[in-house]
């Protein structure tokens, strides 16, 4: 018999999963009833290693020898770093399902070769391999807080590329106003992408001002090594003053445009999730308070900070924006 014990600090999925997903669980399952992976008993069978082929062996990450990166002293934490063992087993990654326990399934994602397409309003559209990108741009480690819209938080040592350096590398035209990032699209590997509840691939965006702020970061690693697949390998967005759903994973496309993008969660739940997604303890989610947060790994409850504690660095980005919901 397999007995699964839930740690005391873990948030029940009935509370953590956004309502439109939870309320449509039957629709989700019904829409996929024809797929073998979602047939009755399939989830249980996969847990025991039946009903699904093991992912093919993956070659070692060729960037592994670059780690650990030099840590920046500019970013301090007010809490301890969340243990890697906890982080690796508690992940939101809807491409692989609505559970927090997607780590095993995520291992099937091939991350080499991996290229990023740079397009739109740039001097020269092009594609660049992730390993070539890492050879051409500054690399560093940063300690950041991470705040989920579900009212839990972590603290991580991210490794990667300051996004302002990536933007300079991409050479956008002066008329570009937004950066649009998309993840891979491969439902044969990521079965969650067969879900009719979302407009795949995962699409997110920032203004140029946000993307070139000192905090915006493209993470290629964490904990002094390349990113784990369940964390968004080989490259993901990290914007620590925003709720975590803005942090698109496994980026394959970066487009510069003068039009605000329709982002995945703003399309899926427009009454609850918006484009800006800035953290504010005084602006509640429609179904729960954002005044406090639970630290994953300890269960400690702490007051939420405006912009997740990064107001000094980013508040000025929004001082002239009127008539918009900046905090959801």
Image (cartoon, helix red, strand yellow):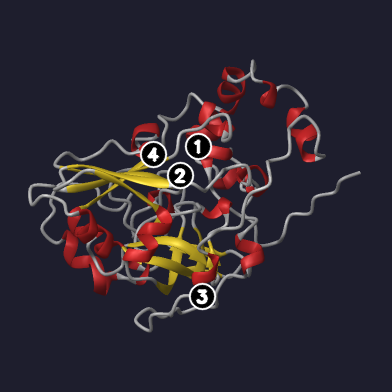
Q: Residue 265's mark? A: 4
Residue 159 or residue 289, whichever sits in front: 159
Q: Mark yes or no: residue 239 visible.
A: no
Which residue lies under the disc numbered 1? 19
In the image, is residue 252 above or below residue 220? Answer: above
Q: Nearer the viewer, mark 4 or mark 3?
A: 3
Q: Quadrant of the N terminus?
A: top right
Towards the viewer: 106 or 294: 106
**In the image, which disc is placed on residue 68?**
3
Disc 2 to disc 4, C-alpha distance:
16 Å
How far apart are labels 2 and 1 at the CA level?
8 Å
Judged from the image, the secondary structure of the residue bearing numbered disc 3 is loop
Residue 150 located left or right of residue 316: right
Which residue is drawn at the image coordinates 51% and 32% (left, top)?
A: 186
Q: CB atoms at circles 2 and 3 under 8 Å apart? A: no
Tell me residue 141's x, y (percent). Answer: 43, 74
Residue 100 location, x and y as percent? 61, 48
Q: Earlier in the sequence, mark 3 or mark 1?
A: 1
Circles 2 and 1, Cβ within 8 Å, touching? The answer is yes
Quarter of the figure with residue 6:
bottom right
Left or right: residue 52 compared with residue 78:
right
- Callout 1: helix, strand or loop? helix
- Mark 2 Cα shell of 10 Å, populated few (<14), some (14-19), many (≥20): few
Contact between marks 2 and 4 (CB within 8 A): the answer is no
Of labels 4 and 1, earlier in sequence is 1
User: Mark 2 or 4 closer to N-term?
Assistant: 4
Q: Nearer the viewer, mark 2 or mark 4?
A: 4
Residue 287's label in the rendered image is 2
Q: Rounded to the nearest whole Å, what is the CA distance between mark 3 and mark 1?
A: 39 Å
**In the rendered structure, which disc, 2 or 3, sits on the residue that comes first in sequence?**
3
Q: Quadrant of residue 236?
A: bottom left
């Amino acid at each position: 018999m397999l007995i699964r014990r839930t740690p005391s600090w873990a948030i029940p999925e009935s509370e953590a999963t956004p309502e439109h997903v939870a309320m449509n669980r039957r629709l989700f399952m019904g829409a996929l009833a024809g797929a073998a992976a979602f047939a009755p008993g399939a989830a249980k069978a996969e847990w025991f290693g039946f009903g699904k082929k093991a992912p093919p062996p993956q070659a070692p990450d060729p960037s592994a020898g670059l780690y650990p990166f030099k840590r920046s002293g500019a970013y301090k934490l007010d809490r301890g770093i969340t243990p890697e063992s906890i982080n690796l087993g508690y992940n939101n990654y809807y491409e692989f399902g609505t559970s927090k326990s997607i780590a095993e399934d995520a291992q099937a994602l091939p991350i080499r070769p991996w290229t990023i397409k740079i397009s739109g309003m740039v001097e020269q559209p092009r594609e660049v391999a992730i390993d070539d990108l890492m050879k051409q741009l500054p690399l560093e480690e940063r300690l950041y807080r991470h705040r989920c819209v579900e009212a839990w938080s972590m603290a991580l040592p991210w490794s990667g590329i300051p996004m302002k350096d990536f933007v300079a590398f991409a050479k956008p035209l002066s008329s570009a106003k937004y950066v649009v990032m998309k993840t891979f699209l491969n439902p044969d590997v990521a079965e969650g992408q067969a879900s009719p509840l979302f407009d795949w691939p995962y699409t997110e965006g920032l203004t140029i001002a946000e993307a070139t702020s000192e905090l915006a970061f493209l993470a290629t690693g964490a904990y002094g090594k390349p990113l784990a697949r369940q964390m968004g390998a080989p490259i993901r967005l990290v914007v620590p003053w925003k709720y975590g759903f803005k942090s698109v994973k496994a980026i394959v496309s970066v487009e510069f445009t003068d039009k605000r993008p329709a982002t995945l969660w703003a399309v899926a739940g427009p009454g609850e999730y918006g484009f800006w997604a800035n953290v504010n303890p005084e602006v509640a989610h429609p179904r729960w308070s954002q005044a406090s947060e639970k630290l994953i790994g300890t269960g400690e409850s702490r007051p939420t900070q405006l912009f997740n504690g990064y107001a000094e660095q980013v508040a000025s980005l929004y001082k002239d924006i009127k008539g918009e919901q900046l905090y959801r």
